[in-house]
Image (spheres, grey):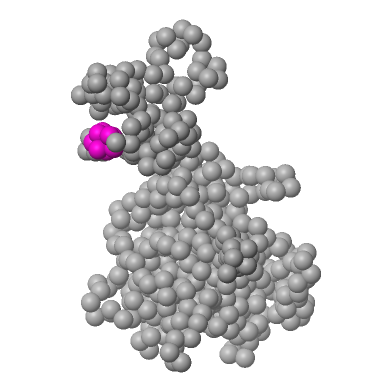
Amino acid sequence: MSDAKIRRPRAETPKGFRDYFGAEVTTRKAMLDKITAVYHRYGFDPLETSAVETVESLGKFLPDVDRPNEGVFAWKEDDTDWLALRYDLTAPLARVAAQFRNDLPSPYRRYAMGPVWRNEKPGPGRFRQFYQCDADTVGAPSVAADAEICAMLADALEAAGIDRGDYVVKVNNRKVLNGVMEVAGLSGDDKEAERGIVLRAIDKIDRLGPEGVRALLGEGRRDESGDFTKGAGLNAEQANVVMGFTTAKRETGADTVARLRELVGSSSIGLEGVDELEQIAALLAAQGYGPDRIVIDPGVVRGLGYYTGPVYEAELTFEILDEKGRKRQFGSVAGGGRYDDLVKRFTGQSVPATGVSIGVDRLLAALHAKGRLTTDTTGPVIVTVMDRDRMADYMGMVGELRAAGIRAECYLGNPKNFGNQLKYADKRHSPIAIIQGGNEAAAGTVILKDLVLGAQIAQNATLEEWKDRPAQVEVPRADLVAAVRRMLDPN
């Protein structure tokens, strides 16, 4: 068969996915190292779980969907179990906590990071694979565990490079919302579907605004693309009760709590949630976390159905320009809460748990917007190849540099065109090219070409500056490592 008739695959990423290259990966790792250092300081241990779980293990707690086999990438295994890529890091933790409950300490404190996958409609900035960084405590019923997670989240954001004043951690309690729903006539098993729609609607208030949320509380809403989302079907009186909850925030935490007490009326579950919010506020205040960092805010509900108590969200408060050049706040980069019933699915026994998840890509975008990404993108020192028969000599230079802790590589492409070697070094953002031709080898020297200074000279350096530090020097071969170090750090 001729080449013309061979059907070759298209070299493109699937819709909703993307590739990450050197600097992006390095930047992400540097940020995660700072965050996990905070988690480690708080006494949390790392955990890595499988990317694949059974659909039964993942359960029905998927974002924005109601059926277990929707929203995930799933396939059938051996005509028995359905398997799926994990859609978050919390459901796998619940499985681990149940599977290894006799071996793990209780409470069990762990942090985890890695990609998750959601089979949802992709859009601008919305991908089907993205990174999360979580920290959870399993086995601690006290709201002190929730307060600790909120404090740790604030510390992690600051460690990553978000200044105090540029973020706020908002805290609420799903028990309070359950009390409000009870007042609105939405309690009981027969109202579960409506409650789910209400939760997801309130969770979108920052994006949709009060009018959009009210539409979802009623018959439904049609978005700009023409897609229609079915609403909860509440009447005007019920919708007013729910909307009152979303606007309950007052000037102080105490005033907000007082307003929430009014809204939940005599609901016992609602009053329990209000009491827990008061306890969390007191515990945080005792540690020095004031309203400049963490606040009580009824607007936070979190859309996932498994939350059972306190919920929290980290919002970045500084302004950026959207794709149309309009100013807007950056928005949420992390969220979490208490999920006391998730492990119970496996064990039949209630196991208290609480945790938070940071959207890694969102936080990276925020740091980029603030100009806080300082990852070194300098490439390796490049040893060029002037004579392919002397490859062992060039590899020897590379070995010496690496042994001295200097990032280095030997040019492994076709060495015939020396200009291409320098072009390669330029693409690699290499600071130095090392050159040794036959004459230099005979003289026992090497040439070090300062590619950074050379580029500056080509642009705007004066003759005096060039004389003070020429872009190319010849040094004895025995002084290679010391000379490279001096050129990399002239100070």
Residue ID at (29%, 71%)? 107
Q: Position of residue 140 (x, y in %)?
A: 34, 72
Q: Position of residue 171 (x, y in %)?
A: 51, 62
Q: Is residue 117 left or right of residue 472?
A: right
Residue ID at (47%, 74%)? 85
Q: Is 394 contained in the magenta span?
A: yes
Of 490 and 301, the residue lying toward us: 490
Could you say which quadrant of the image residue 411 lies in?
top left
Q: Quadrant of the N terminus?
A: bottom right
Q: Is residue 35 left or right of residue 268?
A: left
Of 70 and 258, the residue lying toward us: 70
Residue ID at (38%, 29%)? 433
Identity of the residue furthest to the top in this view: 464
What's drawn in magenta, residue-wise? 390-397
Could you say which quadrant of the image residue 150 lies in?
bottom left
Counting every numbered tag in the picture gives 0
Q: Quadrant of the C terminus?
A: top left
Q: Position of residue 66 (x, y in %)?
A: 60, 82
Residue ID at (38%, 28%)? 432
Of 72 and 260, the residue lying toward us: 72
Whether residue 483 is visible here, answered yes or no, is no
Characterize the magenta stretch by its predominant secondary structure.
helix
Identity of the residue furthest to the left in this view: 478
Whether residue 19 is visible here, answered yes or no, is yes
Q: Is 114 contained in the magenta span?
A: no
Decide: is 394 above or below 449.
below
Could you say which quadrant of the image residue 103 lies in?
bottom left
Decide: is 160 above or below 374.
below
